[in-house]
Image (spheres, rainbow, N blue to C red):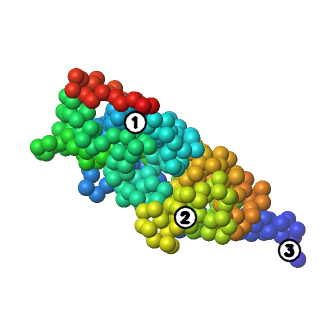
Amino acid sequence: MMKRPLIQALALSLGVFAGSAAADDLMDRARGSFEPIPKYPPVIDGNELTQSKVELGKMLFFEPRLSSSHLISCNTCHNVGFGGDDYLPVSIGHGWQKGPRNSPTVFNAVFNAAQFWDGRAADLAEQAKGPVQAGVEMSSTPERVVTTLKSMPDYVERFGDAFPGQDDPVTFDNMAVAIEAFEATLITPDSDFDRYLRGNADAMNEREKEGLALFMDRGCVACHSGVNLGGQDYYPFGLVTRPGAEILPEGDRGRFEVTATASDDYVFRASPLRNIELTAPYFHSGAVWSLEEAVAVMGTSQLGTELNDAEVQSIVAFLKTLTGNVPEIRYPILPPSTANTPRPTDMVP
């Protein structure tokens, strides 16, 4: 007859083995759907990230004189000290106008398949041109931007260094390419979830792992996968149950406004979830401030599932493991205006 201590020891060892196998299975499943953020910026086709180009792009990102008022820069709506956005439901632009949508974070945007909620820009360089020209945002023109930049000798020299061999390097296109180069460096690696994906099972606690399992089992992963846990494709908002008009305004038809295709009505790019705890308020409308409420809304609207409070809390715990190491950015010293620099326009006529 097997002695009781031996039976107990065997049962304990089997339990440990089963627990270890389950933990390995969860990690393997996660690795099948997600990728850690790389330690270094990715390679961008046609845009080598040279030091001179990145430094120029940083200056331009913080340069308010790209706006006609000399008050609004890229950083105004994509504040690198604020999670990469502006912590507002919708951004405030030229003439104190409200923009139509919540400002997406600039952090890790380089990993998105396309830019903007409706994907109308293929890459960060194309995206950088939009707000500068939008009347509701920076309200400038390519011609004014080029005149402004050429009026300052320091910028002329820096464009020459960043784009060697070009006869006339100070162009609107090169402005956008330089901003893209800087924004490509704004990545946030080494989150707890990244370390877990790289094999450190202790990087996440049991509640967070439970949330990860729920995130996959309930179907969140269908739209939020890859390195950014989103940002890769487009999906109808209100797939199962349409949320209220305060969350999904009827006047904003999403990707339909880009493609004019009926199947794109109220379709939006799946929001990247990296650093999600830093980027409230949520959704393209910016109508929800609580991450818990956002998770619950997604459960009912996209999955047709009413998540209970424990499930919501576990998923939120997992989402908080997506907060990575935010880069420390020092505000650049910008060159002074000259007599040839266009003067600012009034914000309010």
Cα distance between the residues tagged 3 and 2: 66 Å
Callout 2: 10 Å neighbours few (<14), some, many (20+)? many
Q: Is residue 120 above or below residue 265?
A: above
Q: Which mark is residue 266?
A: 2
- Residue with the mark numbered 1: 73
- State the image coordinates of residue 210 (x, y, percent, origin top left): 70, 59
| Percent coordinates x, y for residue 80 in the rendering | 47, 38
Disc 1 to disc 2: CB gap under 8 Å: no
**N-terminal-most mark, 3 or 2:** 3
Give, as a three-letter code, the residue at label 1: Ser
Residue shown at the point (22%, 43%) measured from the top left: 171
Please name the residue that numbered disc 3 is placed on. 2
- Residue 196, can we see it? no
CA distance for labels 1 and 2: 29 Å
Horizontally, residue 52 falls left or right of residue 41, namely: left
Q: Amino acid at mark 3?
A: Met
